[in-house]
Amino acid sequence: MNNDLQTLQQEAIGLLKELITSPSFSKQEDQTAGIISRYLAEKRLYTSRLGNNVISFNQHFDAAKPTLLLNSHHDTVKPNSAYSKDPFKAIIDEGKLYGLGSNDAGGALVSLIAAYVYFYHQPGLKYNLALAATAEEEVSGSGGIEMVLNSPYFNEPLKGKPIDCAIVGEPTLLQLAVAERGLMVLDNVSIGKAGHAARNEGENAIYKAFKDIEWYKNHRFEKISDLLGPVQMSITVIETENKAHNVVPDKCHFIADIRVNEKYSLEEVLDVVRKNVQSEITPRSLRMRSTSISLDHPLVKAGISLGKSGYGSPTTSDKALMPFPVLKVGPGDSARSHTADEFIYIQEINDGIEFYIDLLKKLL
């Protein structure tokens, strides 16, 4: 089997083009899971499916050795209305590969897969390699990496030992995301009293919500991270069930998106909010925690030796759901994610494959 670098790079582009042409919205990734499984099978790699997740362990897996997980996701958000190109037509133009999911996180995914293929058959590696091409990352769903890590089938080869560390493939311009913000989404409901607007009756729930929104806007948490900066709170949605212009609303629902640095737990931030906000608050999840990996970790030191630098990522990924050291790094630019006419440079993918292989060589 020809696994030289140039061949892997060409095959990765072909795989990504096929993935782009197959819609894979979160929780609807069956087609792309099948494409990835078929590609790996054609490369004579053993794979399994857990829901819409594709998993694999290297040929010479030895439970006595530490295990390094390679992970990226194949689900996408839905395309926005500003697309001028068909989001499901993989178009290469002036060195750019256009298409939904090309940058987030298709380029990183196919680059990691190529690196995994490169090492799959090699004996005598210092680490085992596990591959997980996962679903539901864009919605932080329980049917993605969380399903994989909790699966008895996935854990059986490990013989009770945990995963030692991981690389999560996301667009970082191949720089080292050594820390990542946590995410907490809060549903807020302010309660008023319905009345007729013409008679100035009732208690307007919108006005009560404004007071709480003003607190979210102005409050500053004291602890500031060197890598991630301050905790950030944004109000992203506000609505009432009432649609009549002449009725004072008795309820107003609004959503707070809170990005938390590593100085606070999600519970600590939630406690502060509840002490200052009058609305009824319901957190959607306390799973997406801020994470960091030591600059002395072998993965980070290997990346630095390749000329890369560490930074704190403002975005959240499946890294937040992994209870072991994780380095987030990959080709592409996070600024292009979820944008109209999403693209990744062909050269970024080629560089990503070479980087992942060079990084792993320093460990394996």
Image: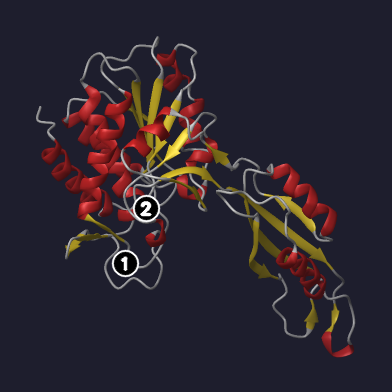
Q: Which residue is mark 2?
A: 104
Residue 182, given in percent of the width and then of the height, sits at: 59, 46
The quarter in which the N terminus is drawn is top left
For the question of whether residue 197 can be seen, the reply is: yes
Q: Residue at x 39, y 65 (%)?
A: 339
Instruction: Please identify the quarter of the rendering in which residue 32 is found.
Output: top left
The residues tagged by marks 1 and 2 sit, at their Cα atoms, a distance apart of: 12 Å
Q: Is residue 53 above or below residue 254?
A: above
Instruction: Please identify the quarter of the rendering in which residue 50 is found.
Output: top left
Residue 9, given in percent of the width and then of the height, sits at: 17, 43
Side of 300 where 150 appears, left or right: right
Q: Which residue is mark 1?
A: 341
Which residue is at the front of the view, 111 or 357? 357
Residue 157, given in percent of the width and then of the height, sits at: 40, 15
Q: Earlier in the sequence, mark 1 or mark 2?
A: 2
SS of the residue at dot 2? helix
Q: Residue furthest bottom?
A: 198
For the question of whether residue 50 can be seen, the reply is: no
Q: Residue at x 35, y 42 (%)?
A: 30
The quarter in which the C terminus is drawn is top left
Instruction: Please identify the quarter of the rendering in which residue 340 is found.
Output: bottom left
